[in-house]
Amino acid sequence: MPKRMTGEALAEAVEARIGYTFRDHARLQRALTHASARGSAGEDYERLEFLGDRVLGLVIAEMLFSAYSTATEGELSVRLNALVNAETLAELAEEIGLSDLILAGTDIRSPKGRKRVNLRADVMESLIAALYLDGGLDVARRFILEYWEPRSREAGAARRDAKTELQEWAHQKSGSAPLYRIESREGPDHDPVFTVSVLIEGYQPAEGKGRSKREAEQAAASMVLRREGVWNDAGEAA
């Protein structure tokens, strides 16, 4: 990442990217500050991330409920999960250009792999919380709909989650359900990384990583589905 911006310069950079002028620049800076760079004030984005996750879920659920009036609860859940997962949030953070604005310690300034995804996803959620607290739900909703609504219409947005798909496939192939096992848990409490393996009778096991057990299980299930040709590289039915 390039030299870090703070204060007014950081606010102007964010505002230019998202088209909203913040009243509280201190909160905005906190929304972009990882625990490794919080300094003596002890302020980072963790609490904002918690709130932003809930605001995002509400707005996306409301959007899907209105847009897909005949969809079942199961289909709506699948669509929502695809839109609020870490991968989608991280991709949108890159699209908006937030990556070079994140304030982080030198040890994680340029994270790789799963940590890179999680960092960007966390910042996106905390930014949503900052928008909500600064301008209210309508401001947060406009921001979310601008970036998430087009995604909701993309091909594959309503595909079933990997664990559900693998459950049915495993029953057809081996007559038994997949078995998930936690192999390891690494990292600090605020940013854990789980490694989970999935076992299916008659097939090689596969591993997946994620910032929660469920996310790691989904990654492991997805790995099997791609390896066995059930899904293609885009995560769609082959």
Image (cartoon, rainbow, N blue to C red):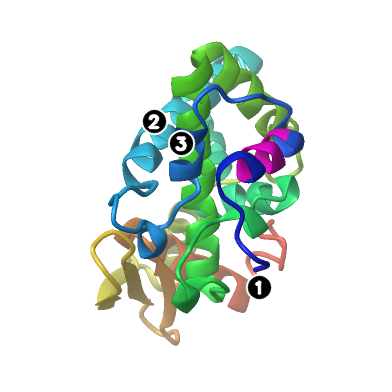
Chain-order first, disc 2 or disc 3? 3
Residue at the disc numbered 3 = 26
Residue kind at label 1, given as amino acid type: Gly
Mark number displayed over residue 196: none
| Disc 2/disc 3 C-alpha distance (Å) | 22 Å
Q: Position of residue 238 (x, y in %)?
A: 72, 63
Q: Are marks 2 and 1 in contact (CB under 8 Å)?
A: no
Circle 3: element type: helix
Magenta part of the protein: which range? 10-15
Mark number displayed over residue 229: 1
Q: Is residue 36 above or below residue 77?
A: below
Residue at the disc numbered 2 = 54
Query: In the rendered view, does 39 fall on the left or right side of 97?
Result: left
Front in this rendered view, residue 21 or 8: 8
- Count residues near mark 3 (Cα–Cα under 10 Å), then give few for <14, some for 14-19, many for 20+: some
What residue sits 54% from the left and 74% below the top? 111
Query: In the rendered view, does 201 fall on the left or right side of 117?
Result: left
| Disc 3/disc 1 C-alpha distance (Å) | 49 Å
